[in-house]
Amino acid sequence: GRSFRPEGTRITFPNGVVVGGEEVIIMAGPCSVENRDQILTSARQVAAAGAQFLRGGAFKPRSSPYSFQGLGLEGLKLLREVADETGLLVITEVMEISQIDVMLPYIDCFQVGARNMQNFNLLRELGYVRKPVLMKRGIAATIEEVLLSAEYILSGGNYDLMLCERGIRTFETYTRNTMDVSAIPVLKKLTHLPVFADPSHGVGIRDLVPPMALASVAAGADGLLMEMHPNPDKAMSDGAQSLRPEQLTELVKKLKQLAPVV
Ligand code: PEP
Ligand code: MN
């Protein structure tokens, strides 16, 4: 609850970037790490736009077992290499307990995906690591369920936790999910944890991402997690919702008019 830390949790990363402070933190990059050229180009574009974190899945939770499943360890190595070259931090998804130790040397933040928000065994293990975690809201999770899942991590002693609204499933089919912007101020009121928004998975349509990103920050989000691909039409996953590089640059400029962005 808020009363545990009325001023809110601040998470300081190795390079001095602070989440939960005055600045809105931008995490951006492709849905998946595809190859060195793609992730290096992405990292350069993400850094040039003014983001602090490079995102990119190495272990991918795909709806179909026949879709690209990610590069695994090779993807982690590429993320670390290009992030170091461009001065970015790395956030990437952990899907199962056995991946935690494999990932630790390469990453700065674990991402728990929507599908794993109620993988309680995974959450419990992430409570024992001493590395920040960003936990996304499940596709049909109530806010109460988000808070209880967060407790699995916090109760293990890992307080470096961020929550992330990423859209929930409703009767509406025009957008991929329905972005529950109201969850942001609710979570900010109920918890001391930094709250992020992922408008890419929230809406699933590239041109709707900037307005929902702006709305999320106006609603109090501490940061944004967004997909951007150097060539979205050729992306191996989630191309339709991936911003073009110039869209990310434009968006960060607009965000700066709303709130301080690094
Ligand atoms: C992702 O970030 O690429 C992802 C799979 O997100 P989610 O868990 O929100 O579906
Ligand atoms: Mn994705």
Image (tube, rainbow, N blue to C red):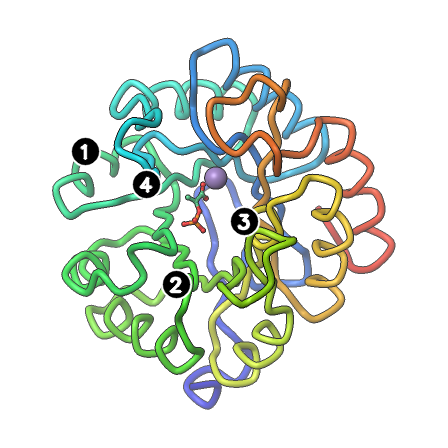
User: Tag 4: residue type?
Assistant: Pro
Of labels 3 and 1, the one closer to you: 3
Residue 190: % across, % down: 49, 85
Specify the farthest residue to the bottom.
3
Q: Which is more toward the observer, 72 or 49? A: 72
The residue that label 1 is drawn on is: 102
Whole-number angstrom distance, CA of label 4 to CA of label 2:
13 Å
Whole-number angstrom distance, CA of label 2 to CA of label 3:
12 Å
Q: Which residue is drawn at 77% across and 34% down?
A: 247
Q: Does label 4 point to a residue whose CB lies under 8 Å from ligand 1? A: yes
Residue 36: % across, % down: 45, 11
Whole-number angstrom distance, CA of label 4 to CA of label 3:
13 Å
Mark 4 or mark 3: name the one nearer the start of the chain. Answer: 4
The label shown at residue 138 is 2
User: Tag 2: residue type?
Assistant: Gly
| Location of residue 105 (image quadrant) | top left
The residue that label 3 is drawn on is: 201
Whole-number angstrom distance, CA of label 3 to CA of label 1:
26 Å
Q: Does label 3 point to a residue whose CB lies under 8 Å from ligand 1? A: yes
Instruction: Give the SS element for disc 1.
Output: helix
Mark 4 or mark 2: name the one nearer the start of the chain. Answer: 4
Q: Which is more toward the observer, 152 or 204? A: 204
The residue that label 4 is drawn on is: 61
Instruction: Give the SS element for disc 4.
Output: loop
Q: Are marks 3 and 1 in contact (CB under 8 Å)?
A: no
Q: How crowded is mark 2: few (under 14 residues within 10 Å), some or many (20 or more)?
A: many
